Amino acid sequence: MASEEPLVAVTCTAPVNIAVIKYWGKRDEELILPINSSLSVTLHQDQLRTTTTAAVSKDFTEDRIWLNGREEDAGQPRLQACLQEIRRLAQERSSARDGAPPAPSLSYKVHVASANNFPTAAGLASSAAGFACLAYTLAQLYGVEGDLSEVARRGSGSACRSLHGGFAVWHMGECTDGKDSVARQVAPETHWPELRVLILVVSSEKKLTSSTAGMQTSVETSPLLRFRAEAVVPARLAEMTRCVRERDFEGFARLTMRDSNQFHATCLDTFPPISYLNDTSRRIIHLVHCFNAHHGATKVAYTFDAGPNAVIFTLDDTVAEFVAAVRHSFPPESNGDKFLQGLPVRPAPLSEELKAALAMEPAPGGIKYIIATQVGPGPQVLDDPHAHLLGPDGLPKPAA
Ligand code: DP6
């Protein structure tokens, strides 16, 4: 039976972010409040993005959600926390807007469909893009303006940073209710046009220990993590903010590597220990240090999250040579033509001196593929109704 009142649907996209000062550890599990502030780079949505459609209709009988075409449990607490939070904000904020179209009823059930344009299991921070996209899309749907940190954060802590393009800081805050635990932009996506990002996909296997579980054990058992949060991060956050503002690549790169290393050190200091890096990750670390030593300057930086994939930061004039060094050290096994995805990178020769300086036996197939990208903008609304992932019946459109 056709509905008298058609459904109201909105579709938006949101980016992945990569922390250069890492978030690891909560002081409040329920509200997702961190034990330290963090700072991240937002990646470009041309290469990595989540697209989400949210729709409401009085005909919907329950909240439902589909991720990459598969229905998931809409009752999961973090999803429900986001929904509750946005409905609360909608009640608080939207009523006063003159001339705006009326927001759909808050009592209607919502359908959500979300899809990534990159492999979810590749360990590429899909939950951050996913919950930022959910928060942003629901806000559009209900006409909620202003800060959405709290909505995104309740889904996944790191998601609040994906609400901003460019460079974002998530202030840990002090309040017990989390009101001041918010993400803010440090600099927009146009701020540092030469900065490039390479994602070296090492493995697409699902990780053994989720971030949520891992950081909880770290908080309970690692004295190093406590030391890091209290004595190390505050100064690093100030220094990283300066490096970004002044586009000081060497400072940015060195601090990025040190902070990644310290995060993984706290994982090893956790009991039982957690190790997210594998042999290929460690070879990449070695490669970066050899490359920098050869140049006598910090030209490339690595960072690793809760998995073995490396994210590399460099400047546009160094990308081609570094990619050549990666190809030399990790010869592509089967998909030679698909090895490099994303932004084009011109082939570059590798000097015999650099080959010798890399000082390692090539490890064929260690890196599955590379995604070349850059700093990008925050969430976007897609105006084209064809972009909706849900059809007029409120169910996912069959994948094209
Ligand atoms: C290593 O945001 O995924 O990527 O808040 O429990 O959902 P939850 O954790 P999540 O943790 C991200 C950890 C990290 C570092 C970072 O992104 O800052």
Image (tube, rainbow, N blue to C red):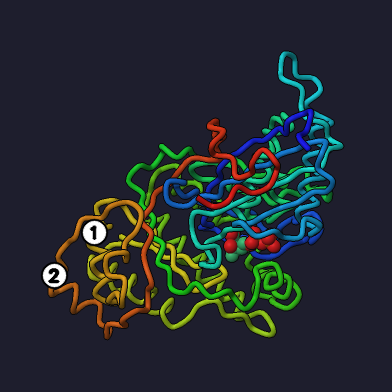
Say which mark, if any, is on residue 351: 2
The percent position of residue 80, horizontal first and vertical second, equals 80, 52
Q: Name which residue type carries label 1.
A: Ala
Amino acid bearing label 2? Ser
Residue 185 visible from this viewpoint: no
Q: Residues within 10 Å of mark 1 (few under 14, many from 20)?
A: some
Q: What residue sits 53% from the left and 40% below the top?
A: 378
The reply to whether the C-beta atoms of the residues labelled 1 and 2 are less than 8 Å apart is no
Distance of label 1 from label 2 (alpha carbons):
13 Å
**In which quarter of the view is residue 254 placed?**
bottom left
| Residue bearing the label numbered 1 | 320
Q: How many marks?
A: 2
Q: Considering the numbered disc 1 on the image, is that residue within a helix, a strand or a loop?
A: helix
Q: Position of residue 336 (x, y in %)?
A: 27, 70
In which of the image's four quarters is ligand 1 placed?
A: bottom right
| Rendered residue at 70%/43% (across/down) | 394
172 sits to left or right of 120 = right
Q: Residue at x 14, y 74 (%)?
A: 353
The x, y position of residue 27, in whole percent, is: 77, 61
Quarter holding residue 71: bottom right
Quadrant of the rendered structure where residue 271 is? bottom right
Residue reaching furthest front? 1
| 356 is higher (above) or lower (below) than 50 | below
Q: Is residue 147 visible?
A: yes
- Of residues 360 and 206, which is closer to you in this image? 206
Asked whether 48 or 227 is in front, the reply is 48
Residue 115 location in percent, x, y?
Answer: 57, 53
Identify the image quadrant of the N terminus: top right
> Few, some or many C-alpha atoms within 10 Å of disc 2 (few <14, some 14-19, many ≥20)?
few
